[in-house]
Amino acid sequence: MRLKWWGQKRTELTDKQKRHETAQEVWDLKIDIEEARKSWLSATRFFQYAVEQDEVDYAVYHLMAAEQRYSMLVKRAKALKDVEWPAWTRSEER
């Protein structure tokens, strides 16, 4: 028996579309890494000025979370195949 899927088109991506999606993914990852790095630096500064025990506890937790996120994103970037890093050596303008 032959089934027909009415109204559905085959959505195969062309090579150009795949390259565009990969470039967009890399660009988004670059932005996430930069934001995570800034967050990590901010958490480091907050930790340096923490005074009371509650502030220190919060600062340590925040610093560890920011460091872990940054590390995770860098690992994700390194795992991408067919991408030379830094992948954003092109103009920073979009």
Image (spheres, grey):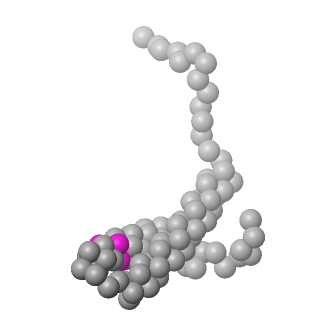
Q: Which residue lies furthest to the front in this view?
A: 52
Q: What residue sits 61% from the left and 18% below the top?
A: 7
Residue 82 found in image quarter = bottom right
Instruction: Please name the predominant secondary structure of the magenta segment in the image.
Output: helix
Quadrant of image for the C terminus: bottom right
Q: What residue sits 43% from the left and 69% below the top?
A: 73
80 with respect to 62 (left or right): right
33 with respect to 68 (left or right): right
Q: Nearer the viewer, residue 5 or 26?
A: 26
Residue 52 found in image quarter = bottom left
Q: In this view, does 40 lie above or below 94?
A: below
67 with respect to 9 (left or right): left
In this view of the protein, can residue 45 be seen by the observer? yes
Q: Which residue lies furthest to the top in this view?
A: 1
Where is residue 58 shown, x and y percent of the image? 30, 73
Q: What residue sits 65% from the left and 47% below the top?
A: 14
Where is residue 18 shown, x and y percent of the image? 61, 53
Q: In this view, does 5 lie above or below 14?
A: above
Q: Which residue lies furthest to the bottom in this view?
A: 48
Where is residue 71 shown, x and y percent of the image? 38, 75
Q: What residue sits 51% from the left and 77% below the top?
A: 38
Q: Is residue 87 magenta?
A: no
Q: Nearer the viewer, residue 57 or 28?
A: 57
Quadrant of image for the N terminus: top left
- Region in magenta: 60-64
Where is residue 34 shown, x and y percent of the image? 54, 74
In this view of the protein, can residue 68 be seen by the observer? no
Q: How many marks?
A: 0
